[in-house]
């Protein structure tokens, strides 16, 4: 037979795990969005440099 304390403890453990996973997902998503902006800026810089080099040669 399970007692109410073990059920309560498992409930709080599951709740803590769910909250922890949600926090990690939100932090991870923020990092992914920041990384995507860095990739966009890097692509713009590389594209501008490539266009500049193409026009400078001709």
Image (cartoon, helix red, strand yellow):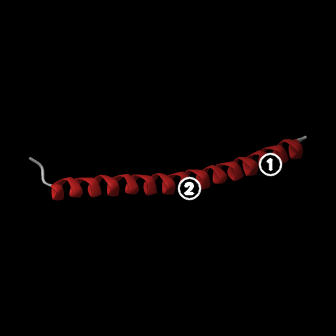
- Indicate which disc, 1 or 2, sits on the residue closer to the N terminus: 2
Name the disc covering residue 30, or none.
2
Looking at this view, name the residue that lies furthest to the right: 58
Residue at screen point 62% across, 49% down: 36
Query: Whole-percent x and y of residue 3?
Result: 13, 54
Q: Which residue is mark 1?
A: 48
- Nearer to us in this view, 51 or 40: 40
Query: Whole-percent x and y of residue 14?
Result: 30, 52
Query: In which quadrant of the rendered view does residue 38 lie?
Result: bottom right
Residue at screen point 17% across, 56% down: 4
- Nearer to us in this view, 10 or 58: 10
- Nearer to us in this view, 2 or 45: 2
Looking at this view, name the residue that lies furthest to the left: 1
Query: Whole-percent x and y of residue 41?
Result: 71, 53
Classify 10 Å Cα crowding around label 1: few (below 14), some (14-19), many (20 and above).
few
SS at mark 1 in the image: helix
Query: Whole-percent x and y of residue 20?
Result: 38, 57
Q: Is residue 41 left or right of residue 27?
A: right
Classify 10 Å Cα crowding around label 2: few (below 14), some (14-19), many (20 and above).
few
SS at mark 2 in the image: helix
Q: Quadrant of the C terminus?
A: top right
Residue at screen point 50% across, 55% down: 26
- Nearer to us in this view, 57 or 10: 10
Residue at screen point 23% across, 57% down: 8
User: From the viewer's perspective, is the residue at label 1 or at label 2 nearer?
Assistant: 2
């Amino acid at each position: 037979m399970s007692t109410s304390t073990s059920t309560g403890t498992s409930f709080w453990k599951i709740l803590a795990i769910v909250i922890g996973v949600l926090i990690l997902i939100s932090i991870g998503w923020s990092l992914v969005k920041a990384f995507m902006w860095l990739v966009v800026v890097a692509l713009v810089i590389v594209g501008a440099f490539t266009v500049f080099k193409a026009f400078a040669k001709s």
